[in-house]
Amino acid sequence: MRLVIEPGLASANYWRDLWRYRELMFFLAWRDLAVRYKQTAIGVAWAIIRPAITMLVFVLFRRLVGIERGAVPDALLVLAAVLPWQFFAGAVSESSSSLIANTNLISKVYFPRLIVPLAAVATALVDFLVTLALLAVVMAWQGFAPGWTILALPVFMLLAVALASGIGLFLAALNVEYRDFRYVVPLLIQIGLFVSPIAFASSNMPLRWRPLYALNPLVGIIDGCRWSILNGRTPIDPYSLLISVAVSATALTLGVWYFRRMERSFADVI
């Protein structure tokens, strides 16, 4: 059967259509959240339990390998990195598989397909906002009050959203054509967990390896979130931050470009 999609995807109308269909994005995000925690005993509390367990594992890892404690309690140091990482990992994972998960919707009606992976990123962002409650509890437990630097947290999270959206759009388009990426994406995320400064601070890296380590765009983003949450008590390297900004902007631009280029063929291939 040949599927025909209504015209209207011209570049001149595309972004206007994206705005017109914004309510669909909010609906898809709400639906994903409802389905994710449906029939679970503790519901949205899983959004807090997962980073809490990750934090405990990495704190235990720091104790076992004897990483020297700094001015900030280990639990806060790790949690301030776990939260942006978990957002990034969830956003990339969910957005990369979002088109495949909405096959029936994509093959039957017209709407800007960009809405589907962006809704998945929005879902991960809601989970991040929920996990801030865990951060508030741990900060209160440790007697640690945020300072003015907390105002910069949305800026660093905006970088994380741009990076996750760009990579997610690129992988979502690839996943339609090559289903191998269903297996590649979880592997890449698992590797990323261990090459990002979560269990340790970037300042723990040997000096000669730091320029190479800063090429990971998550280094600048995670260090920035840590600096913001921990009232500037952890350092932030302008070099790694500059790389994060450049890579995030490039990833978003290339992700949107590749997704738009492949979008016309989604309904025929999916």
Image (spheres, grey):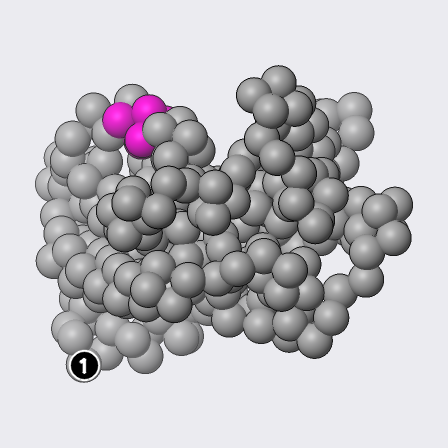
Look at label 1 and name its amino acid: Ala
Instruction: Give the camera-side residue of 149 and 206.
Output: 206
Residue 245 sits in which quadrant? bottom left
- In the rendered image, the quadrant that contains the N terminus is top left
- Answer with left or right where residue 17 lies relative to residue 264: right
Q: Position of residue 133 (x, y in %)?
A: 77, 51
Query: Is the magenta region chiefly helix, strand or loop?
Result: helix
Q: Pick whichever, 11 or 267, lies toward us.
A: 11
At 49% from the left edge and 52% from the top edge, which residue is drawn? 222
Of 62 and 251, nearer the camera is 62
Residue pictured at 51% horizontal, 71% vertical:
155
> For the residue labelled by badge 1, is the local secondary structure a helix, a strand or a loop?
helix
Q: Position of residue 150 (x, y in %)?
A: 66, 69
Which x, y percent locates residue 243? 29, 62
Q: Is residue 19 toward the left or the right of residue 75 in the image?
A: left
Q: Residue under label 1, please give it.
A: 12
Q: Which residues are magenta?
A: 184-188
State the residue at coordinates (35%, 59%).
240
Left or right side of 43 for 182: left
Q: Give yes or no for residue 185 being in the magenta stretch.
A: yes
Q: Residue at x 68, y 65 (%)?
A: 231
Q: Relative to the observer, which residue lies in front, 151 or 183?
A: 151
Q: Is residue 126 above or below residue 32?
A: below
Query: Can residue 255 be seen at all in this image of the molecule?
Result: yes
